Image (cartoon, helix red, strand yellow):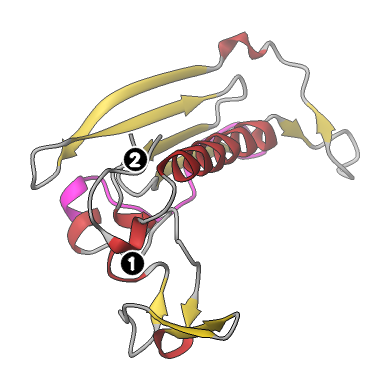
Amino acid sequence: MALPAGNDHSHKGNGMMTSWMGRVFCVGSLLAVVGLSSCTEPEGGKGITRDTKDHSKMNVERQHFGTMPDGRDVWLYQLTNANGLRADITTYGGAVVRLFVPDRQGRLDDVVLGFDNLPDYIEKSPYFGCITGRYANRIAKGRFTLDGTEYTLATNNMGNHLHGGEKGFDKVLWE
């Protein structure tokens, strides 16, 4: 996954570095979801043990999720592991659209908030399941000082800079 090319100042930087960081973040997140879901509660209910099921049953599927206003395709990746956990992650903002996990009886249920379509993510999303950044949370008044130099950022939350500003990673089409 690489950041898109262009003159958007919120994504300036070494293209190779941001591409590498994006890949590491996305792959690391996916491995954490799949890896944690392969843990089970042992007899007696205390602690966590590694599941020994056949992990060759892991699966990745890709489906079309929608089209950006500029005509670019957005994809939804469905990752399923041997325990039945399924994570649906879109290339728009890296958002976790759905996360189905089994309960103690093995019944699957979606445990995250999300939308079923791309237009809602573009127009309405309050950062549901997305990659936030370049900075997560708020930077007060959209200003900070680093090594004696004051920097001013876009303000998009009551005078503060929130989750990367006007176009944070949540609005990036990751490829």
Label 2 crowd bin: few (<14), some (14–19), many (20+), radius 10 Å: many
Q: Position of residue 156 (x, y in %)?
A: 30, 79
Please identify the quadrant where the C terminus is shown: top left
Q: Give the prevailing secondary structure in the magenta stretch.
A: loop
**Quarter of the rendering containing residue 51:** top right
Front one among 2 and 149 = 149
Q: Is residue 13 above or below residue 149?
A: above
- Left or right side of 89 for 7: left
Residue for point 49% across, 17% down: 59
* Residue 104 on the magenta segment: yes
Q: Amino acid at mark 2?
A: Trp
Q: Which corner quadrant holds the N terminus?
A: top left
- Asked whether, in this view, residue 77 is left or right of residue 73, the answer is right
Q: Which residue is mark 2?
A: 174
Amino acid type for the residue under numbered disc 1: Pro
User: Magenta region: which residues?
Assistant: 103-120
Q: Earlier in the sequence, mark 2 or mark 1?
A: 1
Q: Quadrant of residue 89?
A: top left
In the image, farthest residue toward the front = 148
Which residue is denoted by mark 1 in the rendering?
126
Q: Distance of mark 2 from mark 1, alpha carbons?
A: 19 Å
Is residue 71 positioned above or below 155 on the image?
above
Residue at disc 2, secondary structure = loop
Q: Residue at x 61, y 33 (%)?
A: 31
Indicate whether residue 128 is drawn in magenta: no
Query: Do callouts 2 and 1 mark residues in contact (Cβ within 8 Å)?
Result: no
Q: Where is residue 11 drawn, in percent x and y?
A: 35, 56
